[in-house]
Amino acid sequence: MKSGSKLEKLFNQGEFVVSGEIGPPKHANADIIREHARMLKEYVDAVNLTDNQTAIVRISSIASAVHVLAEELEPIVQMTVRDRNRIGIQSDLLGAYSVGVKNVLCLSGDHQSFGNHPTSKNVHDLDSIQLVKALKDMRDEKKFICGDEIKEHEPRFFIGAVANPFGDPFEYRVMRLEKKINAGADFIQTQCIFDMDRFERWMEQVRERGLHKKAKIMAGLMPLKSHKAAKYMQKFVSGMIVPDEIIERMENAEDKKAEGVELCVEQIKHLQQIEGVAGVHIMAVNWENIIPTIVEKAGLYPRPQIKE
Amino acid sequence: MIVAEGKPIAEVAKLIEDANKVLVVGCGGCVTVCLAGGEKEVGILASALRMLRKKEDKPLETVEITISRQCDPEYMEQLEKYITDDIDAVVSMACGVGVQFVAERFNKWVVPALDTKFAGGALEHGVWGERCGLCGECILYKTGGICPIIRCSKSILNGPCGGSQDGKCEIDTEVDCAWQLIYDRMKTLGKLDKLLEIEPIKDWSKSRDGGPRKVVKEDVMIK
Amino acid sequence: MSDFQPKIVAFCCYYCAYSAADLAGSMRLQYPPNIRMVELPCSGKTDIRVVLEAFENGADGVYVAGCLEGDCHFLKGNIMAKRRIKQAKKLLDEIGIGGDRLEMFNLSGSMGPRFAEVAEEMTEQIRKLGPSPLNPAYKEKKETASKEEAQ
Ligand code: SF4
Ligand code: SF4
């Protein structure tokens, strides 16, 4: 066992893991985080806490994780390399582990020009792959980035990274995933999938390289509330592919929300059939309360327990 | 070269609003080449400043001079005879380096007329692009001659990030994704396997993060 | 202010506007006498610095007349002139002289009447704008205006 996190244990048990996502609020009260945690804890195995997503200032992912832990839900702390240098990052990692966080997801982070502080300086002292490596070295080599030994109580994280099968250059995407896994990623969460064909082509390459055996791949999903959201993502979110059929399907549906749920459930059932997909990560942005319904309809409820 | 761009005239005018007579100094180096601070631009700025002030009934006298390079003390001597007592301010049309050299040398109020942008080159006549982030330890040999430090919006050394699409960077569809360029180039060169190596964490102390830098080449020193 | 006679400098390309002016003359067409012409070998010789200096030295308006687009004797001189005029207009706006005191016109050597028309149009435009802020007449005008207001 690398970290002993619940996430790691469930993967080791061979369970089809389900994670959710909570976006912390833009103020200093965490009630909403707690509320979402209580709502989700029966339905997901762990939950991502985003790190100032889209570069908008929010409660920090680590502080949010403390609230989630208090509600007895397993946190996955997202950590971007946009806002902190290696000193800040390592210090925050030690802090996160000290409060009981055991899963970290490493990301580049959206460029600050997307957020509410576009005039800020960005850091990028490390990149996401180097962050993965740093986490692994802390855990397995007991070393800080500078090479100094961590004499005791090294942080032992279950290391996550992201992959985007829909970004370009497509042929290089799997090579880069391999790089991340070689750097030390234990599990991977993908960008939200709408273009299932492309995802399957990508998974084929993943299997060719045997990467699904080296790391657990969780397929990212986003339930759609309306066709407008889908259209917006198709047009304005770079690194996302939303096929026209999906937009049409949503457009033609009478009850858009029900259709969105239906689509998501179908996607989950399909993904379960793909060799190498070890779980799903459901990102219901501003629609967290739909996750229980989706999980139930997909036949993934109740969630498995850890066997001792 | 260093690429710079003129500040708005009104902004420069504000910087010298108390002066009655200014010396406008052009530079014959990079800023002449990038058409921001050479002899011609000196003439335009001086004329515009005079008109603006005449309009406000506070006539401004200008003296115009362009020297070979403002970043070299050797050429600075040419300026000496223009820095007379009646000059209230010096408007430097060099990059930030030139402005500082003039300010260091003379006991005058020196103001910049340009915004210094980057180290780059001409992409076509009238268009310049950024190329080097002056990181102090060049890694271009690893990336097919394309700099990820300055041309990737996130300075990613093991790119591309998830935002790269259709060859463009996530920040703007007008900006090329450096990592797409690197990938394409390495593919053409038959060196894609190199991109599988994990580029280690960079030593930024060689960059300006290590504090202001100096280069010493003893073999050519005179003193 | 109808007695205001603007000083206008016209930079004219030798291949078109300058010949058109000649033609206008031999056709005995009337055009305002307040236009000072400067011959250019091509409108592509337009220099922002010289344009600014014209204003600095008392012009109320300036225009550059070059060949019709696509007909430049030197292929793209008039296109370059157009870009420079755009930039100079921006500068004139920034310093409060006003970009609309500067224009670019395109015509051919055989367009004598058009030349007279352009001179007319430009004079009218500048007359409407009044004297340049650098022209002593500008102040007088302002003073009279404020006096009138006070009355
Ligand atoms: S690697 Fe460093 S020195 Fe080389 S081009 Fe990039 S920033 Fe400049
Ligand atoms: S899209 Fe490309 S250039 Fe832009 S930040 Fe990502 S890797 Fe860098």
Image: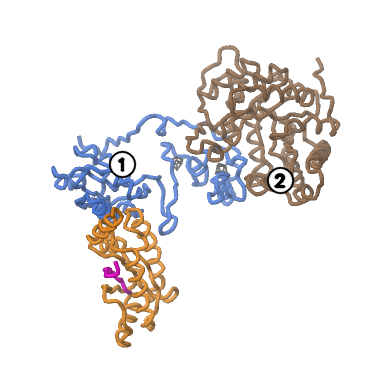
> Which image quarter is the C terminus of chain C in?
bottom left
Q: Quadrant of ligand 2?
A: top right
Q: Position of residue C14 (x, y in %)?
A: 31, 77
- Residue hosting label 1: B97
Say left or right for A199 vs B133.
Answer: right
Q: How many marks?
A: 2
Residue A182 visible, this orientation: yes
Q: Is residue A269 above or below residue B166?
A: above
> Which residue shows up at 35% across the image and 48% down it?
B7
Q: Is residue A122 above or below residue B185?
A: above
Residue that protrudes farthest toward the top in the picture = A152
- Residue hosting label 2: A230
Which chain does tag 2 point to? A
The chain letter corresponding to blue is B
Q: What hue represents chain C?
A: orange
The question of residue C80 being in magenta is answered with no
> Which residue shows up at 63% across the image and 44% down it?
A237
The chain letter corresponding to brown is A
Location of residue C135 (image quadrant): bottom left
Q: Which residues are magenta?
A: C1-12
Q: Amino acid at mark 2?
A: Ala
Q: Is residue A192 above or below residue C33?
A: above
Q: Position of residue B138 (x, y in %)?
A: 44, 39
Mark 1 vs mark 2, CA separation in Å: 50 Å
Label 1 residue SS: helix
Label 2 residue SS: helix
